[in-house]
Structure formats: structure tokens, C-alpha cells
Image (cartoon, rainbow, N blue to C red):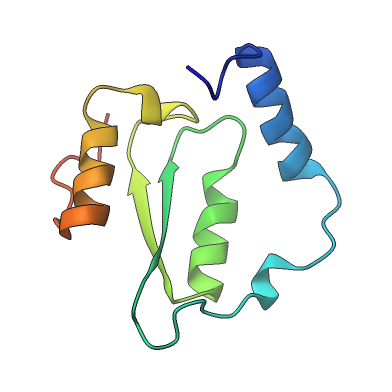
Amino acid sequence: AEIRQQGEYECLHRDVMIGFGKWDFDPLDLSNPFPNYDGSVHLWQGDEDGFVTVLLQRYIAKKLPWIHYHEIQGAGHMFIYDEVFPKQVIRSLLLGEKPTVLSA
């Protein structure tokens, strides 16, 4: 609720501004923040996201092999508000469980 306290439009508008705005760095120049493997970076992407193209996330994940990429079939930008996916994301991150459902 706090994330969307200013309304869903404002939340999505900020996502679009960040996604299509000018950045002061190239994300592909990022190095692994956990070179000793004492942590990890995960990227979760719905393949039907209308705001962030799945092709971009696939490209980034391919160029930065230290990112653990998870693509959710049939899910859009707001998949995190689904009943099933958030639980699997949390269980994956905290318990190291492999997600069992990666399709909407």
C-alpha cells in the first residue's frame, strides 16, 4: 500500500520516467557487487510486461551473467501483486528454493 500511496498512475509514471529517462551511467558497465559470491542479484520479469520489454531484460541478463534471471510466462508489470508469485520470489530469495510456477 505504501508503494502506491500516491496512486497507481504515479507509481507507473515513475517507472516509465526511470526506464526511458537519461541515466548517468550504463547499466551494462556494472560489475558484480558480490564477487566473492556472498550474495546475489536476481531479476524477475513478466514476459507480457507492457512497460519494460522482456527483450531488454533478456539482453541485460545475457550481458551480465552474474544476474540470476527469472522470466514469468504470461505475467505483466504488476505480477508482484499476484497471489502466487510474490511467495515464490520470497521463498527463492530467502530459502534458495527453485520457483515451481513460472507462468501465470
Lateral position of residue 75 relative to residue 11, left or right:
left
Q: Residue at x 29, y 34 (%)?
A: 86
Look at 36% across and 72% down and name the residue there: 39
Assign the C terminus to one quadrant of the image. top left
The answer to whether 9 appears left or right of 64 in the picture is right
* Position in image of residue 59 (x %, y %): 56, 63
Going 78% across and 36% down the picture, which residue do you hit? 17
Between 8 and 6, which is closer to the camera in this rendering?
6
Residue sitting nearer the eye, 59 or 96:
96
Front position in the image: 11 or 55: 11
**Residue 28: % across, % down:** 66, 72
How many numbered discs, if any? 0
Residue at the far bottom: name it. Answer: 36
Q: Is residue 51 above or below residue 1?
A: below
Q: Height in image: 10 above or below 64?
A: above
The residue positioned farthest toward the front in the image shown:
2
Q: Is residue 57 left or right of residue 94?
A: right
The residue at the point 47 percent across, 17 percent down is 1
- Give the answer, above or below, for where 19 lies relative to 69: above
Residue 62 point in image, percent of width and height? 49, 71
Q: Taking 33 as reference, is 7 above or below it? A: above
Is 27 placed left or right of 82 in the picture? right
Q: Position of residue 75 (x, y in %)?
A: 38, 31
